[in-house]
Image: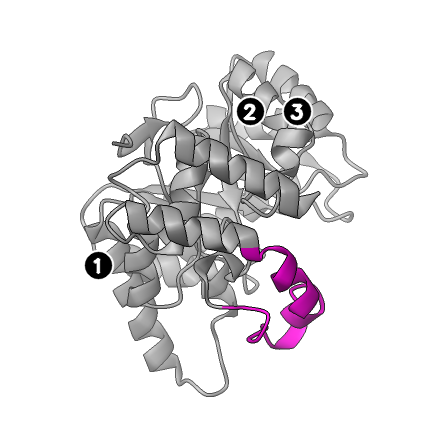
């Protein structure tokens, strides 16, 4: 069985082994749905996720220009239980001082109706301000009680090391690094990032763990995604990854007919990673939560590793 809650890095914060990524809550304002319907679906998704024991919710100021944080704030008003909230700061090139981070954080807190956030992350390692300077700014808002833990996102092994060392001088652990990671994107392993984070006790948070829906089994060579995804996830690509999809199906069947989604998410949990799939509705939320409460065998993980290596090289 997988542990339901795990420590976030070296902090005293415990998070569920699966979180909910809220990027879609920023993009969910669709022309064919009235605002009231969108709000209703988001609230239902939130409640189903909480009911499944998931306590970790990840958003960012960039998601819908603050819309995701606003939706989360509305949901938070309807509950009394403690949950773990993570959001992100975007180091735009015109943000040139430590004060910019504090101002952006205060705006995020206002949108969510919070006095502090549990995990505040640097969204990208963009110049011109150095990683060290931004980590110094992070230490200031930790000292002021505005955030409980510091994380980064999309940082390489070298950049992660710089951030870790900069925070360590302030006696603050680097809690997490959020990166794209799935059975169809093994770059964090191949680059040495997974090994480094294990060594430094930094939690890896995996976004796009279902690879834009590809790993759910929704698509096939005869049913390719529409829109912007079609250029990458085309018929040739979906034909190439069919052996992996077949393996996910076979392994799922051997585990009480688990859906492909649950197997793909559990594979990440077995790697010591916290996946944060997105959900647009209750059904997706319920399926994602099904990645919890059971565990693939070592043989299953090794089989998926091998086939994943073959189809992604």
Q: Upstream in the sequence, badge 3 or badge 2?
A: 2
Q: Upstream in the sequence, badge 1 or badge 2?
A: 1
Q: Nearer the viewer, mark 3 or mark 2?
A: 3
**As displayed, is residue 41 above or below residue 259?**
below
Seen from the viewer's position, the closer of residues 264 and 208 is 264
How many neighbours does mark 2 have within 10 angstroms: few (below 14), some (14-19), or many (20 or more)?
A: many
How many neighbours does mark 3 have within 10 angstroms: few (below 14), some (14-19), or many (20 or more)?
A: few
Q: Nearer the viewer, mark 1 or mark 2?
A: 1
Q: Which mark is residue 308?
A: none
Mark 1 residue element: loop
Q: Are marks 3 and 2 in contact (CB under 8 Å)?
A: no
Q: Which residue is mark 1?
A: 78
How many neighbours does mark 1 have within 10 angstroms: few (below 14), some (14-19), or many (20 or more)?
A: few
Residue located 65% across and 18% down the image: 166
Q: Which residue is mark 3?
A: 192
Residue located 64% across and 42% down the image: 310
Q: Which residue is mark 2?
A: 139
Q: Please say whether residue 2 is one of the residues in the magenta stretch.
A: no
x and y percentages locating residue 57 in the rendered image: 38, 47
Q: Upstream in the sequence, badge 1 or badge 3?
A: 1
């Amino acid at each position: 069985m997988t542990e339901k809650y795990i420590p976030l890095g070296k902090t005293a914060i415990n998070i569920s082994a699966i979180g909910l990524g809220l990027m879609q809550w920023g993009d969910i304002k669709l022309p064919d749905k009235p605002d009231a319907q969108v709000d209703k679906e988001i609230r239902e998704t939130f409640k189903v996720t909480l009911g499944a024991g998931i306590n970790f919710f990840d958003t960012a100021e960039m998601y819908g220009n603050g819309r995701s944080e606003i939706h989360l704030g509305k949901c938070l008003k309807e509950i009394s239980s403690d949950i773990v909230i993570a959001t992100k700061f975007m180091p735009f090139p015109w943000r040139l001082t430590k004060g910019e981070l504090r101002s952006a954080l205060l705006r995020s807190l206002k949108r969510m109706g919070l006095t502090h956030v549990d995990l505040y992350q640097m969204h990208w390692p963009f110049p011109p301000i150095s990683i060290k300077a931004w980590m110094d700014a992070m230490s200031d808002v930790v000292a002021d009680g505005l955030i409980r833990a510091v994380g980064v996102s999309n940082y390489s092994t070298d950049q992660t090391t710089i951030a870790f060392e900069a925070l360590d001088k302030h006696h603050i652990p680097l809690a997490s690094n959020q990166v794209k990671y799935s059975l169809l994107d093994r770059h964090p392993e191949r680059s040495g990032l997974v090994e480094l984070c294990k060594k430094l006790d930094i939690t890896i948070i995996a976004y796009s763990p279902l690879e834009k829906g590809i790993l759910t089994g929704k698509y096939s060579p005869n049913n390719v995604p529409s829109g912007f995804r079609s250029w990458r996830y085309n018929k040739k690509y979906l034909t190439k990854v069919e052996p992996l999809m077949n393996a996910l199906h076979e392994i799922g069947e051997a585990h009480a007919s688990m859906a492909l989604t649950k197997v793909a998410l559990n594979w990440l949990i077995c790697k010591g990673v916290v996946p944060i799939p997105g959900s647009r509705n209750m059904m997706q939320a319920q399926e994602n939560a099904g990645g919890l409460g059971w565990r693939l065998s070592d043989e299953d993980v090794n089989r998926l590793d091998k086939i994943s290596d073959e189809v992604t090289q």
